[in-house]
Image (cartoon, grey):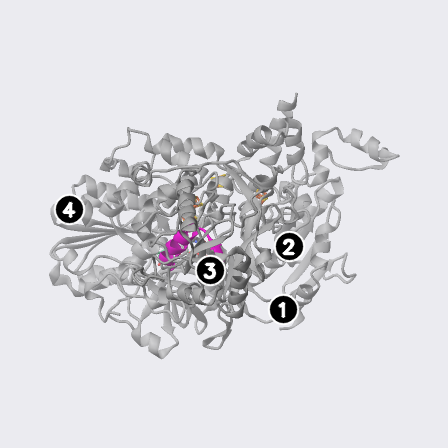
Amino acid sequence: MTDTAKPKLAVYKFSSCDGCQLSLLNLEDELLDLVGAVEIAYFLEARRKTLPPPYDIGLVEGSISTPEEEQRIHQIRRDCKYLVAIGACATSGGIQALRNWARLDDYAEAVYAKPEYLHTLETATPVAAHVFVDFELRGCPVNAQQLLELICAKLIGRKPNIATHSVCIECKRLGYPCVMVSASKPCLGPITNAGCGALCPSCGRACYGCFGPMEQPNIASLGDHLMQDQHVDARGMKRMLRSFNGYLEPFKQASDHYERLES
Amino acid sequence: MSDVKSVAEQRWFLPKSSLGDLVRKLCEQGYTVIAPVRRDGVITILPITEAADIARGVADEQDGGHYRLHDDPEDKYFRYSVGPDGPKRYFFPPRQKLFTMHVAGDRFEMDTVGPEPPKYAFIGVRPCDLAAIAVQDRVFGIASDQSTFRCETETYYQQTRLQSLLIAVNCTRPGGTCFCDSQNTGPEVTEHHLFDVAMTELRGGFVMRVGSDKGRALIDELPVREPNEAELELEELRLIRAREHMGRSLDPQQARDALAKAVEHPRWDEVAERCLSCGNCTMVCPTCFCSTVTDSSDLASNKVTRHRQWESCHTLAFTYVTSGPSRNNTRSRYRQWLRHKLSTWYEQFGSSGCVGCGRCITWCPVGIDLTEEAAIIAADRTLTTTHRSESEVCS
Amino acid sequence: MITSASNVARAEPICGMDAWLPVPARIEHIDQENFNTYTFRLRIIDDAIRRMYRWAPGQFNMLYVPGVGEAAISISSDPDEPRVLEHTVRVVGSVTRGILDTGVGGVIGLRGPFGVGWPVGNEIEGKDIVMVCGGIGLAPMRPMVYYLMKNRDRYRRVILLFGCRTPEDRIYIEELAEWEADGRIDLLVTVDNASGDWAGPVGVVTNLLRRVKVNANQSAVLVCGPRVLNRAAAWQFLQLHVPRSHVFVSLERNMNCGFGRCGHCQYGAKFVCRDGPVFRFSDIADIFAKEEI
Ligand SMILES: Cc1cc2nc3c(=O)[nH]c(=O)nc-3n(C[C@H](O)[C@H](O)[C@H](O)COP(=O)(O)OP(=O)(O)OC[C@H]3O[C@@H](n4cnc5c(N)ncnc54)[C@H](O)[C@@H]3O)c2cc1C
Ligand code: SF4
Ligand code: SF4
Ligand code: SF4
Ligand code: SF4
Ligand code: FES
């Protein structure tokens, strides 16, 4: 196969921490295979050389938080045949979306010495709030193996094996002791999308929900249980839900509900 | 030893200090020995190399959504009941390679067809888990009482099972969510179970009996003696006491009939309010056999691999078809789980799908209790046998 | 193993050493049926397996595109002509797209045949046979049509009702014309929405029932279509007092294994892959009308 026949891959960065792109770069061995299978046409963090669009696969990291970004994402959509939002920032707005609940100026004044130089939108929003996205890959950061699966699946024409069920199913397959049942830790696993390989429970910690809500989550039931049996209060519930994926429905709606209960 | 006793009635006594000999013997015979181990706050079953690895001096406390271990003054081995894992994990692994291959012209060039089936010896299998193994034998088509096609067998399950050795232990301290007594699967190993050796723990050692030629042969290699009258009497007492301490109960026949009729029931809506669709119950259940097969591809080599992993009827993907999932809400998925375990299983495999181990109750994060759900539905006297009228077919 | 489809609804699977291993088969020919549906003629590569391979009308195979996945696809060709092994596939997703992309000369995998097909032989002989199909539902019925035409004298009337969304959605268009001209079966085709020069009936397929007089006690009804059609058709025939035991419905569920192992296809106590896909209505009457089973 000649280079020109290879599918072209583009990687873009918006408001985010680079963690997701690093996941891709950390794949070393697999990355070499990937480089053999696709032409990395645009990836400023990895190489200077860029090829002109159109691109076959576009990976977008980060949330849309500034007016420039809002412009740029539309152009990217036009440039990429298959557009994937990767990571919590791109799929839910991420941690910076917490400002969506506050007055932006309050944050700005607290953080920056000269806030008048900031040009940001009132809200930080996921890519899909602006353009059509072909696939959303969850996680903060994304799981590198899932990212690789997504690309491989796209190349071969397979439906990606990316589950939408609970973390618990992964946790049990891997044989980790349940921290909720055996140690009363308030775990978000039963409402969180699988994909991390039950990383936190594997270290004896409760799931933080970094992969966002699973398919049809029953947050109300888990909430009742945590509040009754594990002494989490409404404020605690709100905080647990408003982290990496707080702005993503139905975490958003549920966190608003617990906020109302707080007062 | 009197000749009139049949092998099944015969008893031996293995002093506690000789448990190590048992483990050593099994290792020598090439077995990977699997036994209960205390790990991260739970009893789990793992490969061991010496008797000291087996959890000892610890007891469990189990209830709906609740599990705790605490040190136990009685320095015995098997004072706890089942933990989240059972032998299922070893015969039917949570994730297993079916094959790796590549297409070479007209042929499928198979690199590997699954892993080599290991030789396992289990120590401390509970009666309910023995019953669950028998249930899965029927599901996976190796039981003798079921005609199967050669190409419907799976080499891995069949071989691992046939070359395994099961050393069971009678339960003298059932757990808080156990109801094997109701399901007729425990707390004592009986002639209805499939096993090689069964033992009852007393302070000084184990009263043993055999259930197969393999078990008989193993006994011959151990430093056993004949048990005395007092030991036999104490064993019997322990086993009777165990039956009086079941944590839960269930009337299987009643549950079966009621659930067959209760396709529609208001209780399904109530349980759906609480159920998280998290799938924990199906993952810990020792009889659940559902799986999903997926493909993966290697970018560099053009090789493809098919894996099979545990799946749960609580997921949407489980019933996905082009027009969407067939069971698109928690209500219908919980209903599938409960009706399958306690009712439709009989028609499929000739027994209940529940052996009463209580795992699904303990490991449900919100403590949903199938014995309670089944009892509530069974108590509903309005359930009738008649099918709905034909005109409703168009609904 | 059986030699002729004439009196069984089930042929046993012929897969290799292990139930999960597919056998390679070459795509010999592709016919385009309509804008998204194609008929693939397959040739099993292994001589021994190919010679043994038999099926009954209504049975299906798991077709495998390496690296992509498997899909349950009914065998749509004549069981009495085992050298022609055909599948008619509507391209709707990744696996079905993969089969098409493999192209003529390419190799895909096959496991099967699985399941219990349409009733044949004594069960339905001497009766009026009414077949009701919607869209791709005609594909699993086609082997049955061949079977009935060949054994025409053993049946009274043989009626085929076929409904599609539009005339462009029809499959086997040339063959439909042949069947009509042949006269051994009464064929009626309807479309939900007429287009082009369509001059035939317009409306859902169950409307066609008015045009054929069903002799309730003397009929066997075979239904295959999407869920709504299955329900509507079954209901209408029951209303006409066709006995429940004479109504047969082919069901569709998610499938992974094909032999009662993976659990996906469960429908009440039934495994659709092993106990079906064709069911006698009386065997599923308690759940057929229920939602989300
Ligand atoms: C017994 C039986 C016979 C069938 N016969 C035919 C036939 O003759 N011709 C035909 O065109 N189609 C037939 N189908 C439907 C066909 O199986 C699906 O259209 C096909 O699985 C879609 O796969 P996909 O990967 O292209 O679609 P995707 O939407 O990408 O599906 C992904 C996966 O979901 C599952 N899935 C999706 N839709 C279905 C479905 N409808 N049924 C079962 N599993 C599904 C499969 O595991 C599939 O691989 C039959 C289905 C069954 C159960
Ligand atoms: S530890 Fe958390 S993720 Fe794991 S099973 Fe328990 S609740 Fe689920
Ligand atoms: S249904 Fe529950 S109690 Fe019954 S065998 Fe399964 S896990 Fe054990
Ligand atoms: S309860 Fe669910 S997961 Fe368990 S065997 Fe039945 S269908 Fe499968
Ligand atoms: S019953 Fe409990 S363990 Fe099972 S899916 Fe529902 S919440 Fe999860
Ligand atoms: S398809 Fe696997 S059980 Fe039916």
Residue C33 visible (yes or no): no
Q: Is residue C39 magenta?
A: no
Q: Amino acid at mark 1?
A: Ala
Q: Chain of mark 1?
A: A
Residue B292 left/right relative to A7: left
Q: Chain of mark 2?
A: A
Using the numbered discs, state the Cα–Cα distance from disc 4 to disc 2 in whole angstroms: 57 Å
Using the numbered discs, state the Cα–Cα distance from disc 1 to disc 2 in whole angstroms: 16 Å
Mark toward the viewer: 3 or 4: 3
The quarter holding residue C228 reads: top left
Q: Chain of mark 4?
A: C
Which numbered disc covers residue A5?
1
Which numbered disc covers residue C214?
4
**Which residue, given by chain and number where applicable, does mark 2 sit on?**
A80
The quarter holding residue B47 reads: bottom right
| Disc 3 to disc 4: CB gap under 8 Å | no
Using the numbered discs, state the Cα–Cα distance from disc 1 to disc 3 in whole angstroms: 46 Å
Main SS of residues in magenta: helix
The residue positioned 59% from the left and 40% from the top of the image is A180
Task: Assign the C terminus of chain C to one quadrant of the image.
Answer: top left
Q: Amino acid at mark 3?
A: Phe
Using the numbered discs, state the Cα–Cα distance from disc 2 to disc 3 in whole angstroms: 46 Å
Q: Which residues are magenta?
A: B123-140
Task: Assign the N terminus of chain C to one quadrant of the image.
Answer: bottom left
Which numbered disc covers residue B91?
3
Q: In the structure shown, which secondary structural element does the residue marked by tag 3 occupy?
A: helix
